[in-house]
Amino acid sequence: MQTISINDFLEKSNVSHMSGPGNFNMLRINEKDPCALQPIPYHRRSFYKINLLRGSYDIHFAEETYKVSKYAIFFANPLSPYNWIPGDGAHSGVYCIFNTDFFHHFGSLQAYSVFQQDGVKVFELQEEQFFRLDGIFSEMQAAYQSDDKHKYDLIRSKIYELLHFASKLDTQKGNVFQHGRASARLVKAFLDLLEEQFDVAINPNGIILKTTFDFAAALSVHPNYLNRVLKENMGSSTKQLIQERFLQQARILLRYSDLDISQIAHMLGFRELTHFSAFFRKHERISPSMCRKV
């Protein structure tokens, strides 16, 4: 299973779009758009997405399926693969997409349960709630299309408004069908443990766990079993998920910190700068120093 990037997603869309910081984009869909009429493939996306939906849908995650009958707001994060299948009738909506860079130094999206592995991701809405949220999206769209130099600050505030609104909605899962919970628990434990490796408060001396065997031992499971569960639920192997998270942290430190590249390499558990440079260049196709200049 492949991971879809924002650029891949936008290239395949049949609507015009603009690119902002953090690859922020916002699109409205109507009944004639392909994404409103066709099933969306089951993939992991490398970006966040907040989607206000109108119509009937089945939205599938690895651990559960949500059935939407009329109105809903849907939160997707880069760690959870999903797809949706439109039901009968008309479908429309609006959504925004962005990556982690869009909120760098502007709070932590991961603190909100809607973006956590075991959080409620889809909320069915009453008609009044739908139109209230549609109004927030309309304000975001007006700012997005304006020439205001501070427009992205306003958009970030509106996204937080959506998150706060969702946090007050009923978290009782209505039309939700659960999948294998043991696998879901293991996926969450792995992702939590992976995030801990980059928490300075927990690991002040840098990365401790770096390999599939390290994580399997910490989770008290066989490496092959961990790999199979992650592959089935997230579409990527344990090694790929670890590498992707390391690369994400490397990009953040290179672009937004004043640390020397050798210090960054040490923080990420590389004993030699050459090893870090070779790892980064292999996956990013540019050197760490070039990434810092981009």
Image (spheres, rainbow, N blue to C red):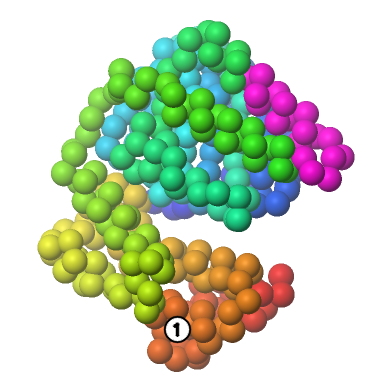
- Residue 174 appears in which quarter of the rendering? top left
Find out whether residue 216 is within the magenta segment: no
Q: Which of 142 and 149 is in front in this view?
A: 149
Q: Please give the residue where the numbered disc 1 appears in the rendered image.
A: 266
Q: Nearer the viewer, residue 107 or 48?
A: 107
Q: Nearer the viewer, residue 287 or 102?
A: 102
Estimate the x, y position of residue 275 in percent, counting from the top left: 46, 87
198 to 270, vertically: above or below? above
Segment tinted magenta in the rendering:
134-151
Residue 110 visible somewhere in the drawing: yes
187 to 197, vertically: above or below? above
125 sits left or right of 285 in the view: left
In which quadrant will I find the C terminus? bottom right
Residue lying at 27% horizontally and 57% vertically, measured from the top left: 190
The amino acid type found where label 1 is placed reads: His
Estimate the x, y position of residue 101 in percent, counting from the top left: 60, 55
Estimate the x, y position of residue 197 in percent, counting from the top left: 35, 67
193 sits left or right of 183 in the view: right
Residue lying at 63% horizontally and 67% vertically, measured from the top left: 256
232 sits left or right of 106 in the view: left
- Residue 203 appears in which quarter of the rendering? bottom left
Residue lying at 47% horizontally and 52% vertically, measured from the top left: 3
Magenta stretch: dominant secondary structure: helix
Estimate the x, y position of residue 247 in percent, counting from the top left: 49, 68
Find out whether residue 140 is within the magenta segment: yes
Circle 1 SS class: helix
272 to 251, vertically: above or below? below
Residue lying at 32% horizontally and 55% vertically, measured from the top left: 191
Circle 1 crowding by C-alpha within 10 Å: few under 14, some 14–19, many from 20: some
Question: Outermost residue toward the right?
Answer: 147
59 to 112, vertically: above or below? above
61 sits left or right of 168 in the view: left
